[in-house]
Amino acid sequence: MSEAGGRGCGSPVPQRARWSLVAATAAFCLVSATSVWTAGAEPMSREEKQKLGNQVLEMFDHAYGNYMEHAYPADELMPLTCRGRVRGQEPSRGDVDDALGKFSLTLIDSLDTLVVLNKTKEFEDAVRKVLRDVNLDNDVVVSVFETNIRVLGGLLGGHSLAIMLKEKGEYMQWYNDELLQVAKQLGYKLLPAFNTTSGLPYPRINLKFGIRKPEARTGTETDTCTACAGTLILEFAALSRFTGATIFEEYARKALDFLWEKRQRSSNLVGVTINIHTGDWVRKDSGVGAGIDSYYEYLLKAYVLLGDDSFLERFNTHYDAIMRYISQPPLLLDVHIHKPMLNARTWMDALLAFFPGLQVLKGDIRPAIETHEMLYQVIKKHNFLPEAFTTDFRVHWAQHPLRPEFAESTYFLYKATGDPYYLEVGKTLIENLNKYARVPCGFAAMKDVRTGSHEDRMDSFFLAEMFKYLYLLFADKEDIIFDIEDYIFTTEAHLLPLWLSTTNQSISKKNTTSEYTELDDSNFDWTCPNTQILFPNDPLYAQSIREPLKNVVDKSCPRGIIRVEESFRSGAKPPLRARDFMATNPEHLEILKKMGAASSIDAEDGLRFMQEMIELSSQQQKEQQLPPRAVQIVSHPFFGRVVLTAGPAQFGLDLSKHKETRGFVASSKPYNGCSELTNPEAVMGKIALIQRGQCMFAEKARNIQNAGAIGGIVIDDNEGSSSDTAPLFQMAGDGKDTDDIKIPMLFLFSKEGSIILDAIREYEEVEVLLSDKAKDRDPEMENEEQPSSENDSQNQSGEQISSSSQEVDLVDQESSEENSLNSHPELLSLADVDNAASISPSEQTSNPTENHETTNLNGECTDLDNQLQEQSETEEDSNPNVSWGKKVQPIDSILADWNEDIEAFEMMEKDEL
């Protein structure tokens, strides 16, 4: 950044007081910058923007209304079974459940969203419910990080907007800081977590008993993630500034100071996890995604909110290191903190999608546009951003829990550029959510973006962030009832007022940064960047950056992952890749001998070669595994919206190579299918339902095949088992020749199987589709019964939506590593015999026919056309009119309600690998 860009906008303190992350004006001095847009994208009419904004409102009503109808006061809604998720009453999902504290999480997380969406009456009702019903004195162990950003942040955001509404004189006139008192109570409950010598908090705490007491069941942990310890300053400082109790800000600052001190000095990077007692790095890889992401975010935002120069200095030091080592445009790849020129992995996780938005705040627009466009191309291929994907854009972890980070960056880029292209991106997000994630009782997370199935999960952050960013993307200033530029977004999109920077400033602002490093003052922007730097006088600026990336997913090598040494550019041979190695090639053997001996470049090549060999070996093992399959209910009233994740069989018809099997289902007699069927006339020409147990899977298949069945579905006999919490199964043969089995066989867990059984009891005739991935719904049958809309917002959602139906590769999903995302169970192979099935763990699934060549990290551009199929887009119409306000019957008859509620939206249910 030039001198004019860094210092020419005004004096530091007054300028910072006017910054607003919400409208992205923190990235520039001139408000007119938000009106700059690039030619090449046609402006969106105000009418269409209003239409899309109204559609977002209706979608929020659908999600929030179903939570309040079916789940409240539980923490979260389970949208597939239309009930609340209560800690301890559902099978444990591991660390994911640490966000649940029996404190009505979704309600608190949604408070300020209600105000942003101009639902002030609902907000007032929600605040009364929080004050009346929420109890923080629960004997439950929760994540300090999640409780801070979701609950404490939600309470403070609600308080911020409650006092704003009270000042306006129409709503909340009775309010007297009650939410702030609840927030203060919660803050004191979190403080015992900081009782460590380092000042870094324990990762978990018992809300009732604190830390290290026998009844607390926590306090023995030694490690925490960097983001977990470094994402506290906004909420804790705001709590101190609101209440005058300085202890909260002091504790959060001490944790940040310790993390800064422990950074790797030569690279200025931090690792993913750290020992809270010794300060030693436990995981020494570094990136901008899971485990670190919001640490960087809070350094910059703490400067914006609190006006402390040391936070900006630290952020800029880290940012310089990120752009030097991690940023390989358009990719952001993890590296080793001690050897930052060496990539730590060949995949990226979905949480890094926030980073382009942070770069907008920083004022570094070009790399923000590049990374955002790359992510958008991945979304266009898979409909959603997979939890992790490789450098050649294959699925690594297939889940998508409806994360909002990409929508966040889309909003900030639009506010920074005014480019209507980003409105079209937002429109695509809305269409995909409605087409693939919307279910009768809310929106369900995707279990696998490749097959389109769902998980019984709707996280609170979906309401806290996704609808907020999407609504603001399409809203004009007059559509919002307050000046959103007076607030800053937390990492959970909660709103904190900027005037806190001048309130209760009793914290010592000792600048500790310069004690640890010599800083290049030219790297630091003390006010905001000059808009002429952000937006060169070229109306095609943003488009020119995006254009080379349009085909990066399907056809091209990612430009940024090519790290070519100068010697390679001058004509030297590129390094040997593991996939090209041949033990019979003398030249290859000679190269191996040189690795690690001749030079530092050879040593780095050797490390990379060994890492690739390990990955290649793992990849070859996984080729022996089969990908998950789909059971799609296509009859009335489902019409293809319910997709159940099914385990494959190692025998029978291979659904990935043959056309799907479609037919009505019928239960076999005997139900276990272990002997000749006594009701062959019932299963003749149908898909037989059989229960697991008492004999081999292959024997069951032969018996139903002999009875004339065209396929079989084995339902687990372990009551309550679910793909939500259990690894996927693949059914093994009986050790004999199974070539005689010609019909397809799939496996369903008890929960998924009960959906089909309940449908049979309710509707008698149930038709399903057995396939390798979900197919488009049946529009002809669906059009026979279209519900009428009941209000304006529903009419809005009923507009025809043109959306893309894209082919999704069934690609390999590598075994999970320790990370701060969700756990990723492995695929199991089992032979079911005599109630003691033989279970053998295996790697996660891959497509055995897939070309496993990966992108060359050193300059070789492999032919991705052989790896990724072309994106296929087809237009189809839908008419999603729905009303969440209708009363729903008890759980045992929930399928009957789907008949009224589901008619217009695609539901998919899918499994996590």
Image: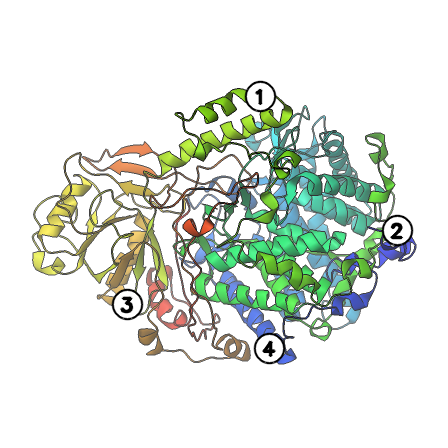
User: What amino acid is at disc 3?
Assistant: Ser
Dot 1, crowdedness within 10 Å: few (<14), some or many (≥20)? some
Position of 859 relative to 213 (above/below): below
Name the mark nearer the viewer: 2 or 1. Answer: 1
Q: Nearer the viewer, mark 3 or mark 1?
A: 1
Residue bearing mark 4: 48
The residue identified by callout 1 is: 596
Label drawn at residue 635:
3
Quadrant housing residue 756: bottom left
Q: Earlier in the sequence, mark 3 or mark 2?
A: 2
Q: Helix or strand or loop: what does disc 4 sit on? A: helix
Looking at the rendered structure, the secondary structure element under dot 1 is: loop
CA distance for labels 3 and 1: 63 Å
Image point (62%, 59%), residue name: 546
Viewer-nearest residue: 191 or 252: 252
Closer to us: 456 or 643: 643
Q: Which of the two labelled residues, at mark 4 and mark 3, occupies the earlier sequence position?
A: 4
Q: What's under tag 1, amino acid-wise?
A: Gly
Tell me where residue 367 appears, x and y as whole percent: 68, 52
